[in-house]
Image: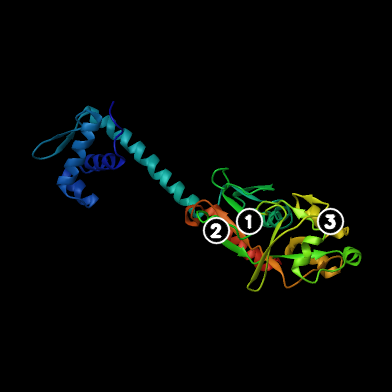
Amino acid sequence: MNSFPDPDDLRVFATVVRKAGFTAAAEELGASPAYVSKRIRVLEETLATKLLHRTTRRVVVTEEGERVFHWALRILDDMDHLMQEVTITRQQPRGLLRVSCSFGFGRNVVAPAMSMLVQKYPALQVRLEVFDRLIDVAGEGFDLDVRVGDDIAPHLIARRLADNHRVLCAAPAYLQRRGTPRAITELPAHDCLVIKERDHSFGVWKLRAGADERTLKVTGPLSANHGEIVVQWALDGHGIALRSLWDVREHLRSGRLVQVLPEWGQEANVWAVYPTRLQVSAKVRVCVEFLMEYFQRVEVG
């Protein structure tokens, strides 16, 4: 069984037929006549047929060569269109963009941004999916994962979109009932609202105050896998929560929640994580650039 002909050999052959000679074809291709002759010979061997008869004055195309010539033109035209389409796709955002994110941040922050994105790029369609677990971006077929938290595997490509950190907070009613912790070592004795959400280790809080870093095992009467549930429990006075500033900022401003041990917190910046370089996909590139601009306009961390 013969292998498929090399497209470059088809292009050389088509040029020889059009120019009616090896030397003229070589000049147009910027190659030597010897190179052109070699590629024609390889093509004939691949197709197992004689394509050209060479005389001292001119090149004559065989009957098989005529058929191959017409097929070559069609194949080369299709390949040119393919390359043009791929180039356009890299330059202009179009088609389906699959984006993943965590529950709360996806619904409250990323969803409004995606609404504005498709208004700006009408040829783009966005499918936003939210999860309570870390996503294998490439393995699960996503173009982009918008991730809150700095624990990112080194093999992934990531760009920082916005600064953010998590804070400890509780309702005034809880603090009146149980007292306000004055030192981080007092936290394990309090009712802590534990969450298992994507990159969180269940019941383990890693907190930092300047250069001092502590890892605490905390417990409480209520736990969930959804940040909005935990915030509501904190508002109801059930305990101390560790939540991103974007999620509790308004409650802190209104006084419904009070920050506890304000010198302690947890870095949880917002990242765009994607499986391929941005220059490969226009839709991913414009989305990442749009999110960076968007987060500069809205409060996140």
Question: How crowded is the residue under tag 1: few (<14 C-alpha within 10 Å), some, or many (20+)?
Answer: many
Q: Please tell me whether mark 1 sits on a helix, a strand or a loop.
A: strand
Total labels: the figure holds 3
Q: Residue at x 88, y 63 (%)?
A: 174
Q: Where's residue 66, x and y in %?
A: 25, 31
Query: In the image shown, does 233 or 290 lie closer to the viewer?
Result: 233
The residue pinned by badge 1 equals 147
* Residue 211 point in image, percent of width and height: 63, 73
Q: Amino acid type of disc 3?
A: Gln
- Please name the amino acid that badge 2 sits on: Ala
Q: Is residue 84 visible?
A: yes
Q: Earlier in the sequence, mark 2 or mark 1?
A: 1
User: Is 193 located above or below residue 7 in the figure?
Assistant: below
- The quadrant in which the C terminus is found is bottom right
Q: Which residue is mark 3?
A: 232
| Residue drawn at x 80%, y 65% as measured from the top left | 169
The answer for how far apart the CA atoms under marks 2 and 1 are is 10 Å
Mark toward the viewer: 3 or 2:
3
Q: Could you say which disc has been placed on residue 158 in the image?
A: 2
Q: Residues within 10 Å of mark 2 (few under 14, many from 20)?
A: many
Q: Quadrant of residue 241?
A: bottom right
Q: Residues within 10 Å of mark 3 (few under 14, many from 20)?
A: few
Q: Height in image: 37 above or below 263? A: above
Give above or below for 229 relative to 168: above
Secondary element at image label 2:
strand
Q: Are marks 2 and 1 in contact (CB under 8 Å)?
A: yes
